[in-house]
Amino acid sequence: MRVIIIGGGIAAAYLANNFKKLEPSVEVTVLSEETYMPYDRIHLCRLLDASKTTADISLHLDPMVKIELGQKIIKIDKKAKRVFSKNSMFTYDKLIIATGSIPISLFNIDAISNAAVFRNADDCQMIREGVKEKEVVVVGSGPISLEILETLNEMPNVSKITLLVRAKHLYSKHLSIDAIKIIDDCYTNGGKINISYEDEIVDKVIENSQITLLKTKKLTIQNPFLVFGVGIKPNIEDFADDIRCNKGVLTNRYMQSEDKDIYAVGECAEVEEFGFVAGHVKECILESDCAISHILQKDLKKFELDISVDMLKVGEFDLVEVNSPKFTSKYEKVLISSKKDSRIDEYFIDDDKLRKFIGINSNVDIAYVESLIESEEKVDIGYLYENRLLGERGRLICSCENVYHQDLVDIVKQTGISSFGQLSDFSQAGRVCGRCKVMIEDVIEDSQHLIDPNIPIKNPEDIKREKEIQKVQKRLDKFNTLNPVNKLSTKNLQAAMDSLDIAKSEVNSWVSMVTANMQLHPNFEQVVDTGVTMLNKIPIIWLELSDCSGNSEAFIKSTNPSIEDLIFDYISLDYHELLMSASGDRSETILEDIVKNKKGEYILIVEGAVPMGMDGKFLRIGADAKTGVELLRECAKDASLVLAVGSCALDGGIVAAKPNPTGAVGVGEALQREDIINLPGCPTNPTNIVGTLLSYIMFEELPALDKFNRPLWAYEGRVHDNCERRGHYELGEFVQEWGDEGAKKGFCLFEMGCKGPYANVNCPTMKFNKGTSWPVQAGHGCMACTEIGFADKFANERVYKEDEK
Amino acid sequence: MKKIVIDPITRIEGHLRAEVEVDENGVVREAYVSGQLFRGIEIILKDRDPRDAGLLAGRICGVCTNSHFRAAVSCVEDAYSLELPKNAEIIRDLMAMALFIQDHVVHFYHLHSLDFVDITSALSADAKLTSKEAHKYHKKPFRNSHSHYEDVLEKLGKFVDAGKLGPFSNAYWGHSAYKLTPEQNLIMISHYFEALKFQTNISKAVAIFGGKTPHPQSIVVGGITSVADMLNPQRLNDYLFIIKEAKDFIDRAYLPDAKLLAIAYKDEIKAGVGRANGNFLSVGGYEEGNKKLFDAGVIYNHDFENIASFDEDKITEEIDRAWYKNETLDNEVEYTDLNEDATLKTAKNDDKYSWIKAPRYDGRVMETGPLARVIISYKKDNKLIKSFVDEFLASTDLELIDLSTSIGRNATRAIETSYICEYIFKLVSNLIQNIKYYDTDTWTKFDFDSLSKDAKGRAFFEVPRGTLSHFVNIKDAKIENFSVIAPTTWNATPKNFDGIRGAYEEALVGIKIEDTSKPLEVLRVLHSFDPCLACAVHVMDFGETNLHKFKVDAKR
C-alpha cells in the first residue's frame, strides 16, 4: 500500500513513523512544502532568538519514510488517485492531509518587508532580521502573541515592544482581572514592553514595500516592525475545491473525508460530528492513531473528545489550563488567589461539575484536576482550598505527562542521569508537546549535585517495576476495601501459620518460589506475600465433576504443602467435597449461599470432565440429583472467574478418550464459553493453581493466555527445552531400553517415547511433591498430559509420529 | 418410616449417595447406597495397546493412584507371563507401602476424625489436663507440652472468632453423639494439623520412586523406570528418613489416638455399631522371605475359627440392580433414572439404583479392607502382625470381634499402618542387599512383537481400602476387554434380586439416628469404610456375568 502524507509538522512525522512501526510494508511518502525537514513548531521561538536551528528542533523520521521537500500540493485528482505539485505528480492508495494551519494577518503583508506572521522557520528568520533597532508591534492577546512577546523581550537588540490588544484581556476572555494583572505585570515590569488595551490598527503608510507609519486608536508609531499573532486557520485553501470542507476538511471519526481514500488529520481537519478542530499536539496524535487504525484496519479506534491541557511558561509566571470538551461560557467561577505569591487558581464550575481550570503559578495537582473533570464529581470547594499550597512534588513541569519538579529530581537522584536524552528511559516528560523540554534540562542540570555516588543507581526496568508494584499494592488495598465480608485479616493468617508451626522463613521461601514461578521479579515478593493473605477474601467453590480427585489430592499435598494447606483453608475454600466437614443438605446450603449471595465475587474451580451424554445423567450430585452439567452451569453463571483444573476439565481428558462413552467434554465447551482459564495437567501442579489465583487478585485481570487459555507464565515453556536431560539429547545419548546403562546415567528418554517435545508446561523447573521429582527424573519421560487429547495421542511409551492416528 | 437422603457424602473420593429408611425411633431399617458417576474407563481401554493400560487405568483414581497403575501393568505382565526383577518388585512395593501410610493417616484425621471430634468443644480444654490425658495412650505422646496445647488453643480460638471456618463450616458441631472431652478433642485437633504436614512429607516418599504423586509415572510393563533414583544412595536415604519420621508420628500420635477413640466410644463398639455381615475377604500379598505381610483367606459370618482359602474362581459379578443391561452380551449401560422426587428407585427388587456393579464371592456379599486383612492375618497366626493386634486389644480392653465395627475399622487401619512401617525397613534392607551384590536390574526384557497375540491376565492386590483386582483379555495384540473390581466395589455394592445388602448397607441397618436432620451417625458408618467412588464404578464387559467364564472361555 502506498500512503502519501501532505504536511511537514508533528502530525505528518507522527503518521509516517507509526505507519512504518505498525506495518513496515506500507510505502510512506511525506510531501512538505517547506524546504526544511519536518520540525517541531512548538519550539519556533527558539528559532526566533537563534538559540536553536531547524536541525535542532527537527523531528525524528523513520529512515524508511520517503520525504519530498518543497512540494506544495496544488491539486488532487481523486479519480486517478494522484496529487500534483507545480512540477511533480504522486500517486497514492491512501492520502492523508496534514497541512496544519496558516496564520492570519489583518491585511495582506506578502509584499511588505517589515511585517510578519509567526508560523514557520522562514517567518522566524524574517522577524529576527527585521526587528533590529526597531520598535516592534505585536498584535494579538492569545498564547502565540504572549510567547512571541516573551522571546522578543529577551532579545538584546530589541528595545521597545508594543502589544496591541483589541479587548481588555490577555490570554483568555475567561480570565479574571486579577489574573490578567499578574500576567501584565510580568511583561511590563521590565519597562521594555507596553501593552495597549482596547486598541487596534486604524491606518498605515506603506512606502517602498515598507510600513513607515502605523496609526492605532491610541498610538502613532514610526517605522515599526509588525508581527501578527492574532490566530490561525486550517490550511486547506489548496484543496477546498476538491474535498468537502467547512472550517477544515470534514471527516468522520476515523478522520476519513467524503472520499474514502482521503483522510485529514490535525489542525487542517474538522471532525464533522463534533465540529471539532484540533489545537493541541495530543489531539493531533489521537487523530493520527484513529486514521492509522482505519487505514490498516487494525484495532479500530474512533476519535473521542477529550480533556485538553495547555501550558504557558513565560519568565516569572506559568499558566496551566485544563479544559473539558463540555465547557461552555455558562459557568460560575471559584477564585482562590494570593497576591503575595502571585498565584491564582480559577475553577470554572457548571452544575456543580468542574469544566475548566486555569491556574497561574498554581500548585494544584493537574492529574487531580483532570480526574475531577473526567469523573464529573460534585466539586468540594473546601477541598480545592486545601489543595492550593505547594505539594510535596513541587511545581508542575510537564503537563502532558503530569511530571512535577520533585519527580524529576527523584529520577535524577535514583538513576544518575545527566541529560535530557537519558531521561527518555524513565519518563516521557518533555517529549509529548515538548514545551517544557528546556525547563527539564534545567532541572536535570540543577539536580546533579544531589546524586549520591554511593547509592546504586536504578535502571529503567527497576523504575518501571516499582511503578507496577505500587499499582498492584493499590489494587490489593482496593480489593480489601471492596471485600470486607471475610473478617480474616493478615493478623489471623499469621496466627494460623503459627498454629501450624510454620516458620516465617518457610513462608518466605515459598513466596519466593511462587514469585519466581510466575516469572515476576523478586521485588514482587512482598506483594505476592500480601496477595497470599488476600486469597482468603475470596470465596471459592471447588466442584468435582467426572474426575478422580487427583487434582484435589495434588493440591493438598504437593509443593511445600503444609503452607498450601494453609492457603487452602484461608482462601475460604467454602465448598470442596473432599475436605469439607458438612455433608448432604448442609453442604448444599453452603453452595447455594455462595452462588446466590456472593454473585460476581466467588471463584469457581472445576475438576473433572463434564459428561454430556444421556442428558448429563452419567453424573448426579446432591439431594436434588442435579446433573453435573446443570450444577456447573449454576455455579459458573455468576462466578467472577472459572478455573478448569486438570486435563479432564480442559477437554474431557481421559474420560473423553476414544470412544468417549459418556460424551465428556471440557468445562469451556460444556459452558460454551471462551473465558475459562485452563490449567491442565494430570494432575495440575498446585503451584500453578495458586499462582493463577494470585495473579488474578494482584492484577485484577486474567494473566496472559495461550491459544488454549492456559496462563503463559506456567505453560509457555516447552518441556523439551527446559529438560534436565536436554544435554544428552544434543549429544545423541539416548536410553535404548528401560533400566539400561543409559537409564542409569540419566540419558535422554526421547527414544523411549518421551513427549517432552510436544508438551508446554513448567514441570522441569517446578517438579512435583516439594520439588522431589517429575516423570522425566523418574526415568519414564513426559506424556504431555497438558495437551489437548493427550490420552489418545501421547499416553504411551512409543515415539510419537505426527501422522499416527 | 421416613427416608433420609444424604448427597453429597463429603470427605470421601467421588460421588456417593446414601438413602436410609428410619422408623419412629430413628433406627435405620433399610439402606441404599449408590455411586452417582459413570466414566467407563474400561470401555476406553478397549482396542488399545496392552502396554498403555497402566498409564490410562492409573487415572481411574487420583487417591488410590498407584494401586491401579500397578495392577493394570501387573495383569498385562501376568498375561504374558513376564517375571519381574526383584528390584522392580521392591520399588513397586515401596511406593505401595508409602501410599498405605499416607492414605490411612489422611483418612483418619482429615476425612474421618471430624465425625468424632468436635472442633468447638476443644476450645474449652485445659492445656495441662490435655497433656495429662495424652499420657494415658502413650508414654511419650507426640508434641505434648502444655505450651504447645496452649498455642493450639489460642490459634483455634482466633480461628473460630474470625467466624470463617472455611471447610469446617456448617458441620454438626455440638451434636449429642460427640462424646470426647474437650481435652480429648484438643489432642485430636492438634494432630489434625500435624497430619496435614505429615501427609505432604509421606507423599514425597512415593514421588522419590514414582516421579510424582498422585499419578506416578515410573511403572512399565516388565519393571520400573526409576533406576537412577534406586541407585542413588541419597534418594534411598531420603525415603528411609521420611518413613522414620512417619513412624514416629504413627507410634506416638496416630495409634494412641485410635486407642483414645476406641476407649471413649467403647459403648458403641460393644453395641456393634457399624458391623456388617461378617464375610471377609483378603487376597494377601507382599512377600518377606517365606512370609507374607498379609495372609489370604475368606471368613463367613464372623466365624473366625474357620478360614477358607481364597479361590479366585469363586468371584462373580452381577448387575441385577446396577445401571447396566441384564440380558445383552455386552453389558451396556441401561440408565433407568431416578424417581421424580430425585430419590433412588428402590421400590421393587429389580429396580436399578447404582453405577456400582455387584461382585460376589461364592455368591456372597463380602467386606474387604484393613479389617478383613487384620482379622484373617491374625487368625492365620501371621507373626508380623500378631503382636500389634494383641497390644492394641490389651490396652483398650477389647476383643477381636469388637474390631468389626465402625470404630474398629479405624483401629485396624492404625494397627496396619504401624506394622507396615516395620515391613518397609525390611524391604529397603532387601533392596540394599540386592544392589550391594550387583543386582541392578529393574526391567525384564521382552520383545512385544514376538509375544503371543492373544492372552489373558489378572492381578490381585491388597491396597489401602481392600482387595483390588484387574483383568485383561488381549486379542490380536490389543486389549479386547478390561475389567476392574476395586475395594469399594465390594463394600459399596448394591443389592441383587435377592435383596441381600452389601457391607455399607448392612452396616447402616440398625444404627440409631438421634436427629434425622443431622445424620452424623450415617457418616460415621460410611466413612469407616473409607469410600472411594472413582475406583468403585466399573462397567463389566465380558458377556458373562461370571468371571470364571472369562478365565476359561478362550473365545472372549
Image (cartoon, rainbow, N blue to C red):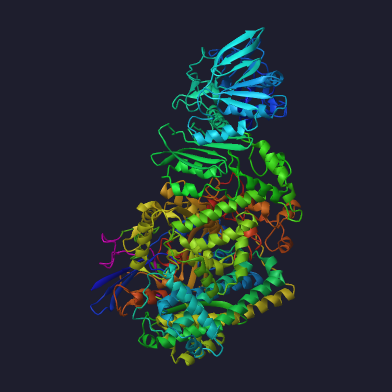
Taking the image as shown, residue A141 lies to the left or right of residue B281, namely right
Q: Is residue A512 above or below residue A405?
A: below
Quarter location, residue B123:
bottom left
Residue B306 seen in the figure? no
Q: Residue at x 58, y 26 (%)?
A: A195
- Residue A725, image x and y in percent? 70, 57
B434 vs B175, left or right, is right
Foreground of the two, A16 or A786: A16
Seen from the viewer's position, the closer of residues A506 and B80 is: A506
- Please say if A242 is above or below B370: above
Q: Residue furthest top?
A: A208
Query: How many labels sit on residues?
Result: 0
Q: Is residue A691 visible?
A: yes
Q: Quadrant of the N terminus of chain A?
A: top right
Residue occupying image coordinates x 44% and y 75%: B112
B231 versus A595 height, above or below: below
Locate residue B382, reporting x and y percent: 54, 86
Report if residue B340 lies within the magenta region: yes
> How far across and how far down the image is residue A702, in percent?
51, 50
Front position in the image: A497 or A483: A483
Q: Quadrant of residue B243?
A: bottom right
- Magenta segment boundaries in residue numbering: B338-363
Q: Is residue A217 magenta?
A: no
Q: Main secondary structure of the magenta part?
A: loop
Q: B7 and B174: which one is in front?
A: B174
Q: Position of residue A355 (x, y in %)?
A: 45, 37
